[in-house]
Image (spheres, rainbow, N blue to C red):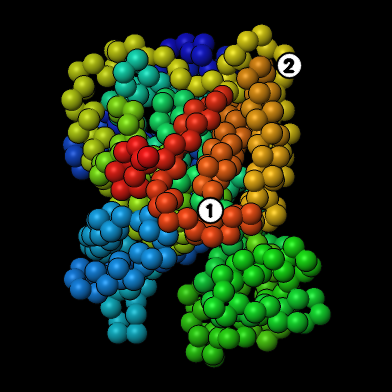
Amino acid sequence: MIDSPEIPRRRNAEALDAWTDVLVIGGGPAGAWAALAATEAGVRVMLVDKGYLGTSGATAPSNTGTWFVPPGEGRRLAIEQRQPRTGGLADPHWVERTLDTAWEKLHCLADWGYSFPHGDDGRPYLANLRGPDYMHFMRRRVLAAGVTVLDHHPALELLGDGDTVGGAAGIDRQHDRPWRIRAGAVVLATGGCAFGERILGAATLTGDGYLMAAEAGAALAGMEFSAQYAFTPKPSALNKGLPFRWASFTRQDGTPIATAGRDRHAAVAQALLEGPVFAQYDKAEPDVRAWLRQGQPNCFLPLDRSGVDPFTERWPVTLRCEGTVRGVGGIRLLDDTCATGVPGLYAVGDAATRERLTGAISGGGGPNSSWAIASGNWAGRAAAIFAVRIRARIADRPVTPLGRAGLRPAGTARGALAPHELARAVREEMLPLDRNFFRRETTLRRSLERLDACWGELQDQEPGDALAAVKAREAAALVATSRWAYRSALARTESRGMHRRRDLPDADPALVCSFQASGLDDVRVSRADPRTSAPAP
């Protein structure tokens, strides 16, 4: 145990000081797979989670499909057919290796005893995961593998030794004590950022990993593709989209909203700007209705509780922002190992950019689920290999904290931070359809002016004690992520995929490239080759 003056504390709780080979930050599916892969490589692993490994994050409260395509000609065709929809930004090599790894690991999951649902032929249906029992199974598997799991231990910042990332520090919320863990390598599995929107499992998804990575020197990629919105029965937070494939949409007076051959999200978004919109699953035949109720029972709960028959009656619907949770943006990856470019630091799942997998469009449930499995395995193995190289000095090397905003004022502190005010500003700038879903240069600049002012406020605020520090860092991450998203949206002077510029409605053939954002006080955006991350003209 050590004293830890760098992290604010309550009472006189004793700090936790530990070391490990690989530290995984985040307990969603990508973090769980990364921890398993690292232990299989023979190293010591610790996993810290902001909530509870098994229930936190976007996967645990819902069912999810996987992108599960057998090797062979069918897979080649599936990749080829999807490529034009990605805006030309996906990399078929990365799609292939994601599908390969997911195929292998889902079979492992079956061999380990996970109870997949069965298809009509009586065989396990490996393309479907039930979120609650999937994550409960992964928790048991992680613990059985010998991983030390610290629940309710949010990470506040990374530690560095001048050349490499050397661990992380945070707060033990249940005991109000700081913790510091030195590590040979760190895997960020902290999820995406929902910009404070009310959607399932997103309360803790505030972009914490993006902020920590940027403070260590990493860049972000694909952040302009943060405008994914989901159909949601109003006023619920249930952002599950599958049943809406069989939905028709109408205005208040019953006038149909034409969606055939159009981007139906855009058609409904435009109608929502003009008035209430209603939905009805009237395109589903009786056999589909039964299948939907059996396969996606939680999708019907808010409607059943309201006494609505969703197949024969219409009900109010809205679009809720999913930010980078089902968007694309995240920490830039430099190579096949999910390395971030900062030695010793790796990123997986929604914490990492999915641009090479999905390009300019959302990965939805299936591709994102397969990505979590694949990226977790690649990064876990790579982090273990990296850690072994420096194992002899992990425990003793001097490390310094890398966190800034919300933890350490840049100058003389001018007062206590009000995180809820900053979070409210982010919600007001990032959630409205006429700001983020439909974009214009004028509104982007107006929002950035406010968000930049928020960032300026963060620099000079007095850090709070333990739990207040968590809220301050969440607010800082929300503001930072919003600024990277809108700076990148300004740079991409066209419309492509979910990036819809009303002032520039067409795609520009010269912009089949990645935009990468870096920096905190001064955000810089540059072009890069989407398949190599090398600078592009």
Residue 29 percent across, percent down from the top left? 39, 50
- The residue located at (45%, 17%) in the rendering is 401
Q: Quadrant of residue 164?
A: top left
Residue 62 drawn at (x, y percent): 51, 61
Q: State the CA–CA distance, disc 2 to disc 1.
A: 42 Å
Q: Where residue 242 appears, x then y in whole percent? A: 52, 72
Q: Which residue is mark 2?
A: 415
Classify 10 Å Cα crowding around label 2: few (below 14), some (14-19), many (20 and above). Answer: few
Q: Nearer the viewer, residue 321 or 7?
A: 321
Task: Examine the rendered structure and indicate whether residue 34 appears above or below residue 72.
Answer: above
* Amino acid at dot 2: Gly
Residue 453 disc label: none
SS under mark 1: loop
Task: Point out the tag, 2 or 1, that comes first from the N-terminus.
Answer: 2
Q: Residue at x 28, y 59 (%)?
A: 92
70 on left or right of 365: left
- Number of labels in the image equals 2
Left or right: residue 72 compared with residue 58 = left
Q: Which residue is mark 1?
A: 494
Label 1 amino acid? Answer: Glu
Question: Closest to the observer: 17 or 86?
Answer: 86
Considering the numbered disc 2 on the image, is that residue within a helix, a strand or a loop? Answer: loop
Tell me what residue is drawn at x 20 percent, y 73 percent: 73
Mark 2 vs mark 1, foreground winner is 1
Is residue 59 visible in this depiction of the protein?
Answer: no
Q: Residue at x 47, y 31 (%)?
A: 518
Q: Nearer the viewer, residue 325 or 238?
A: 325
Give the percent coordinates (x, y) of residue 203: 60, 46
Residue at far bottom of view: 286
Residue sticking out furthest to the right: 253
Q: Is residue 66 left or right of residue 71?
A: right
